[in-house]
Image (cartoon, grey):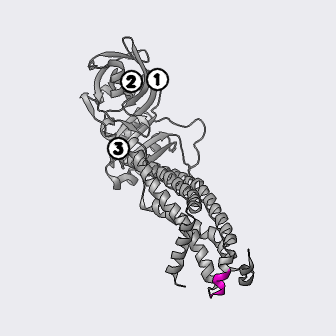
């Protein structure tokens, strides 16, 4: 029998049992829907993180205290670990030929007060070129000058969320606020930045790095941000930073230089693992759907035993019987897969409209995976019923009541 005739026969058989066929497809439909939604979420999150890191600048380096990877250098002896200091920042700035900017970062937190209003917020001590290196802009006023850093001046620059919560519609420029019970004069207001990696970049108070170290009683910086001249200069910049700081730290590498590519590679690895886990979880529902198809097809073989005997008696070969039942299973699975795909795409579009910040991404790869899985489930779940139908003895089948 021609393949097309077998396919049409399989479709006619399913149409004769519409409700049974529909209920059987539900398992695959739910499975494909789960695959599409979960994998789209994982892929969307990965792309969102990649775009966020790219927006920070592909030629940025971070220098953090402590050796995160020894790789043969060995851990520094106890008691000889040096902190990252203001002098390290100045050394990199003056000696680094492949560097296009260096800025200190001091992380902290505190309560900002003005009159009877107060807000707990994140306080960031920074160098004079932090805004340029991190691609931030001052909307009103000015950013810190190097003289402000050197003189430990008590100046502050506020993010938009802090301004709104503390001052409302009032202009805060030139006013004095208290941060951790110390007075600071506001010299600038940052441009609205929004949320990055779940962190509100507008809910920040910026201080000169040296002033922040005084405020938090620190003798070292949290980290240094270094910008290479361009993408090509990243490796020379890493080597130069490592060499300069190693000499300053008594020939010890008790710090770590991290590039954006390193961070992105780590994030991609984590997200790839998460995507595989999500795919495995979603595949469980497809397996359940496949078991449902196999069960219904076995019932169908028993119900159609006499039909199989008649077809064998009039000349149908075993392969024709097997192919017909296999096609029925594949058709059921593919219909469920296509319905799940349409429903999944619709839900992704709806969620993207209702929650624009939700990182969902439907790609051709995800569609291919979903359809391929559903077809595979159909084949695997149809093999055993098809073999049982093909192996029936024609004489016994004709006698079956």
Query: Label 1 crowding class (10 Å Cα cut-off): few <14, some 14-19, many 20+?
Result: some
Q: Which mark is residue 216?
A: 1
Badge count? 3
Residue 396's place in the image compared with 101, above or below, is: below
Q: Which residue is mark 3?
A: 95
Q: CA distance from mark 2 to mark 3?
A: 25 Å
Main secondary structure along the magenta-highlighted residues: helix
Q: Which residue is mark 2?
A: 211
Label 2 or label 3, whichever comes before in sequence order: 3
Dot 3: element: helix
Dot 2: element: helix
Query: Is any part of residue 78 visible from this angle?
Result: yes
Which region of the structure is painted magenta? 309-315
Q: Nearer the viewer, mark 3 or mark 1?
A: 1
Image x and y of residue 43, in percent: 46, 53
In terms of depth relative to the viewer, which is nearer, 244 or 7?
7
Q: Residue at x 73, y 84 (%)?
A: 395
Dot 1: element: loop
Label 3 or label 1, whichever comes before in sequence order: 3
Quick one: which residue is furthest to the front in this view? 401
């Amino acid at each position: 029998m021609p393949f097309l005739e077998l396919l049409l026969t399989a479709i006619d058989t399913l149409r004769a049992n519409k409700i049974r066929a529909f209920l059987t497809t539900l398992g695959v439909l739910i499975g494909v829907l789960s695959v599409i939604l979960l994998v789209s979420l994982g892929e969307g999150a990965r792309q969102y993180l990649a775009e966020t890191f790219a927006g920070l600048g592909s030629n940025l380096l971070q220098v953090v205290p402590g050796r995160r990877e020894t790789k043969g250098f060995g851990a520094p002896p106890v008691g000889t670990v040096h902190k990252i200091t203001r002098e390290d920042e100045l050394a990199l700035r003056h000696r680094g030929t492949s560097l296009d900017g260096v800025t200190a970062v001091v992380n902290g937190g505190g309560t900002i007060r003005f009159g009877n209003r107060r807000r707990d917020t994140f306080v960031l001590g920074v160098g004079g070129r932090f805004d340029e290196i991190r691609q931030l802009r001052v909307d009103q006023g000015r950013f810190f000058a190097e003289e402000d850093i050197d003189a430990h001046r008590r100046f502050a620059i506020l993010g938009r969320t802090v301004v709104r919560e503390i001052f409302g519609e009032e202009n805060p420029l030139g006013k004095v606020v208290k941060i951790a019970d110390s007075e600071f004069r506001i010299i600038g207001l940052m441009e609205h930045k929004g949320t990055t990696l779940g962190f509100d970049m507008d809910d920040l108070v910026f201080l000169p790095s040296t002033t922040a170290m005084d405020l938090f009683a620190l003798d070292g910086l949290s980290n240094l941000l270094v910008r290479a001249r361009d993408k090509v200069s990243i490796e020379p910049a890493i080597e130069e930073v490592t060499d300069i700081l190693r000499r300053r730290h008594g020939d010890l590498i008790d710090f770590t230089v991290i590039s954006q590519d390193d961070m992105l590679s780590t994030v991609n690895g984590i997200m790839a693992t998460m995507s595989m886990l999500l795919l495995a979880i979603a595949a469980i529902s497809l397996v359940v759907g496949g078991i449902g198809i196999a069960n219904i097809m076995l019932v169908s073989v028993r119900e159609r035993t006499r039909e199989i005997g008649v077809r064998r008696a009039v000349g149908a070969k075993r392969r024709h019987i097997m192919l017909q039942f296999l096609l029925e299973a594949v058709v059921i699975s593919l219909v469920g897969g296509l319905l799940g795909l349409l429903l999944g795409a619709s839900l992704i579009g709806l969620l993207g409209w209702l929650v624009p910040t939700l990182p969902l991404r439907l790609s051709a790869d995800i569609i291919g995976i979903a359809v391929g899985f559903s077809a595979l489930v159909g084949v695997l779940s149809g093999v055993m019923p098809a073999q049982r139908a093909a192996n029936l003895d024609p004489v016994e089948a004709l006698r079956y009541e």
